[in-house]
């Protein structure tokens, strides 16, 4: 039953009887509100969700008649249930009202209460469908927001912010994008950003984001994975199967690790990228693809091309826009903000861990570490640290970082053996203390010593303070 009804009544009183009957028919829990003119009507529709709008044909908004007002309402909301009322029945007027977008036509006069009750009952199903659609829209919006949060690029780095703007700029342009960067730098995040920034035209819905790890398939399987296959194309192919190019129609096809493919396969990809056409494995019909290609690799493609392992023509076609993601060690300002981001994410998964926080020494250790695995490694470090203990502070030992690799044996090779061993022990002790921010208990754990054994070593080498 409608619970929020908006009645346009510029007369302020002529529709009293109608408003009263609507209130009775909808019940005491409903709210029937009057708008006195066109401006009030527009504001009410823009600011609130209504179950039903009622417009009088003759009164309209006090200036324009009801059919003109109906056209304005439809411009604001194409699906909002609207009933047009009139003082007398007229088949032609009723036809015009419905043709203009009214959901129904109501005649005032005798037996108004019965007519309103019948009208409200007729509109009940429409209101239910509208509520279901609104709920679905809210759910879809929540899913989109969750997906955007999942693929959000967290950074304080000016260089990375510049790349984010570049990805957003190229998003609407239906051309290939090549994303380069070391492992774990976030190449797929940038691919998602390009996809979410794309617009495929007013008549098309943006298609799906489809990802393929080219390094995960043997070449014959990769060809079938991307292009699909016909029935009987090979043993076990008992039906026609769509490939990723087809599944990514109007969307984005992300080809990860494109640098790990063979030259023969690169030639096939080149044709699909160049002409937007492909042939299913075992087929003969040339099919068109509207998928946007985003490729990524951690390989040095310039070196690969010089050594003949990557097609220059494919590089040229993919490199309409090249996004080179710097490693995490080149943007140290991101370490702390990313660590905080991952910490918030993981402690939020378990209520008992929500008090966990990174200690100052742990943050310092993160800043000093090079992260060869980049952001992915930082994420894994924080995830393990969060679940390793339930104490409030996450210490350096909880991070499980390897000891700093500053032990160059050449530093000790010129010393006599006993002195070289002593110098190496001092180096180990100093590095462990530096990595733990001077926390001896953590340093001892990292070195595999008891606390007393650590104190003995410090005293032995004159490091005891």
Image: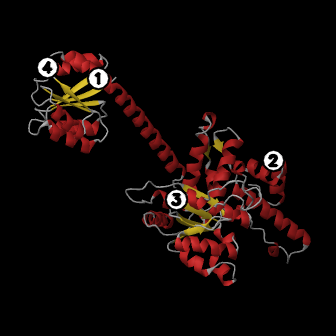
Q: Secondary structure at mark 1?
A: helix
Question: CA gap, disc 1 to disc 2?
Answer: 80 Å
Question: CA gap, disc 4 to disc 1?
Answer: 17 Å
Instruction: Give the mark nearer the N terminus: 3 vs 4.
Output: 4
Q: Secondary structure at mark 3?
A: loop
Question: How has the structure been colored for display?
Answer: secondary structure
Question: CA gap, disc 3 to disc 1?
Answer: 44 Å
Q: Secondary structure at mark 4?
A: loop
Mark 2 surroundings: few (<14), some (14-19) or many (≥20) residues within 10 A:
some
Question: CA gap, disc 2 to disc 3?
Answer: 62 Å
Q: Quadrant of the C terminus?
A: bottom right
Query: Label 4 belongs to which residue?
Result: 109
Residue sitting nearer the eye, 323 or 256: 256
Instruction: Give the mark nearer the N terminus: 4 vs 1.
Output: 4
Identify the residue at the far front of this view: 91
- Residue at horizontal 38 percent and vertical 56 percent from the top: 203
Q: Looking at the image, can residue 326 be seen? A: no
Residue 451's disc number: 2
Residue 411 placement (x, y as % from top left) = 80, 74
Residue sitting nearer the eye, 58 or 374: 58
Instruction: Give the mark nearer the N terminus: 1 vs 2.
Output: 1
Query: Label 1 belongs to which residue?
Result: 120
Residue sitting nearer the eye, 299 or 392: 299
Corner quadrant of residue 333:
bottom right
Residues at marks 1 and 2 touching, judged by CB atoms closer than 8 Å: no
- Residue at horizontal 54 percent and vertical 74 percent from the top: 274
Query: Label 3 belongs to which residue?
Result: 249
- Residue at horizontal 61 percent and vertical 71 percent from the top: 269
């Amino acid at each position: 039953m409608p619970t929020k009804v908006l009645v346009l009544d510029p007369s302020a009183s002529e529709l009293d009887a109608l408003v009263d009957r609507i209130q009775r028919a909808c019940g005491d829990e409903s709210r029937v509100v009057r708008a006195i003119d066109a401006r009030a009507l527009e504001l009410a529709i823009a600011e609130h969700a209504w179950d039903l709008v009622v417009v009088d044909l003759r009164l309209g908004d006090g200036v324009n008649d009801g059919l003109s007002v109906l056209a304005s309402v439809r411009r604001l909301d194409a699906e909002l249930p609207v009933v047009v009322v009139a003082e007398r029945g007229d088949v032609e007027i009723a036809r015009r009202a419905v043709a203009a977008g009214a959901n129904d036509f109501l005649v005032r006069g005798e037996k108004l209460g019965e007519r309103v009750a019948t009208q409200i009952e007729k509109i009940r199903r429409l209101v239910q469908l509208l509520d279901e659609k609104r709920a679905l829209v809210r759910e879809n919006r929540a899913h989109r927001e969750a997906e955007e949060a999942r693929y959000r690029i967290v950074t304080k780095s000016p260089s990375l912010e510049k790349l984010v703007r570049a990805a957003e700029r190229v998003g609407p342009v239906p051309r290939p994008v090549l994303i380069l960067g070391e492992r774990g730098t976030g190449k797929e995040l940038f691919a998602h950003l390009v996809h979410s920034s794309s617009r495929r035209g007013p008549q098309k819905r943006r298609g799906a984001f489809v990802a393929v790890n080219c390094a995960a398939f043997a070449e014959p399987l990769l060809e079938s994975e991307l292009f699909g296959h016909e029935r009987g194309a090979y043993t076990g192919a008992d039906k026609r199967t769509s490939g990723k190019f087809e599944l990514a129609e109007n969307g984005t096809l992300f080809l990860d690790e494109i640098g790990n493919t063979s030259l023969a396969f690169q030639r096939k990809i080149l044709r699909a990228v160049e002409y937007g056409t492909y042939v299913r494995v075992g087929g003969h019909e040339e099919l068109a693809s509207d998928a946007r290609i985003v490729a990524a690799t951690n390989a040095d493609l310039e070196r690969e091309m010089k050594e003949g392992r990557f097609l220059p023509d494919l590089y040229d076609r993919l490199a309409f826009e090249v996004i080179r993601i710097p490693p995490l060690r080149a943007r140290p300002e991101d370490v702390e903000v990313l660590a905080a981001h991952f910490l918030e994410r993981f402690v939020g998964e378990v209520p008992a861990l929500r008090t966990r926080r990174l200690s100052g020494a742990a943050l310092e250790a993160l800043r000093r570490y090079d992260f060869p695995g980049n952001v992915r490694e930082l994420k894994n470090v924080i995830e393990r640290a969060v679940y390793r203990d339930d104490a409030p502070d996450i210490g350096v030992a909880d991070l499980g970082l390897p000891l700093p690799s500053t032990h160059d044996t050449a530093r000790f090779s010129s010393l006599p053996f006993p002195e070289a061993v002593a110098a190496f022990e001092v180096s180990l002790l100093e590095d462990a203390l530096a990595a733990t921010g001077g926390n001896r208990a953590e340093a001892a754990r990292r070195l595999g010593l008891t606390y007393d054994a650590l104190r003995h070593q410090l005293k032995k080498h004159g490091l005891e303070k």
